Amino acid sequence: MRQIKHPNIDQIELTDIMYALSDPTRLEIVARLAHAGRKMTCGEFDLNRPKSSMSHHFKILRAAGLVETLIEGTEHMNALRVDEIEQKFPGVLASVLKALASS
Amino acid sequence: MRQIKHPNIDQIELTDIMYALSDPTRLEIVARLAHAGRKMTCGEFDLNRPKSSMSHHFKILRAAGLVETLIEGTEHMNALRVDEIEQKFPGVLASVLKALASS
DNA sequence: TCCATAGTTCGAATATAATCGAACTATGGA
DNA sequence: TCCATAGTTCGATTATATTCGAACTATGGA
């Protein structure tokens, strides 16, 4: 079963995290993943955008190191890499998630 | 004495903050302002870029609500709006600054 | 083997951003 | 009044992102 490559923690750049989080669609994806607290398929995010657009945003979230995608059958299960990001940039993702939750 | 307009706290958007912080040059400006802990003129940042480029980045930092610019004589004194950002998005700027300091 | 489902990749159009020189504005000092 | 300094604005160029349809890949089930 093939899996998608993800950046290692030490390869994650703060600018990439910031960039990934500067787009409303991606911020929404991150907020929903955090709120759900579980792995979600790409299709579950009903953001009214074509598959190719969603795929593009997930690609950027993965490249930034924010999201981890595991292939299970025909589905791609996405999860936030909260613990790893927290370890590398303490407080950053947590405070952003908190800001998202209260808005 | 004319002054530059800045967004009010309640007008500040998280996406704008993230976007402003996704550029290495602007992140460097923010890091230096934080490290200095005082108001700095645009010219003090010796980032090897023409004035117009620096002005562009300051404009974005101001629009995002991150930087406040006060005109004093012929100089523009820039300061981070740490307290206001902290109030609106607790922990966000603080954790980013911490990440910048330790890198 | 055939088909449906889930998601990616490709390619092209459009939009947005970065860069920088040149011209401009505002202030203060000689 | 003239000039230097600090920074902004303008305009053009180039680079990068977003968007989305269409074609593609991989898996699992009938």
Image (cartoon, coloured by chain):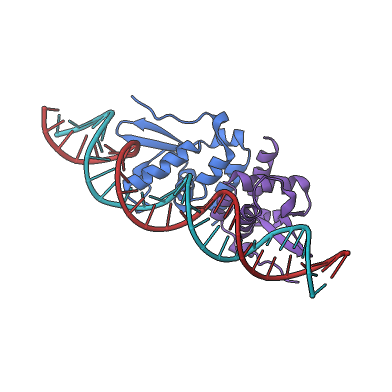
Chain colours: A purple, B blue, C cyan, D red
Q: Is residue A49 visible?
A: yes
Q: Nearer the viewer, residue B45 or D21?
A: D21
- The residue at 63%/38% (across/down) is B90
Q: Quadrant of the N terminus of chain B?
A: top left
Residue A43 shown left or right of residue A18 in the figure: right
Residue A13 is situated, as x and y percent measured from the top left of the image, at: 56, 58
Q: Quadrant of the C terminus of chain B?
A: bottom right
Residue A55 placement: quadrant: bottom right
Residue A69 shown left or right of residue A12 in the figure: right
Residue A91 is situated, as x and y percent measured from the top left of the image, at: 65, 48
- The residue at 38%/27% (across/down) is B3
Residue A65 shown left or right of residue A42 in the figure: left
- List the single residue furthest toward the top: B1
Q: Nearer the viewer, residue C24 or B103?
A: C24
Residue B6 is situated, as x and y percent measured from the top left of the image, at: 46, 31
The number of callouts visible is 0
Residue C29 placement: quadrant: top left
Residue B66 is situated, as x and y percent measured from the top left of the image, at: 50, 38
Q: Nearer the viewer, residue A53 or A64?
A: A53
Q: Is residue B98 visible?
A: no
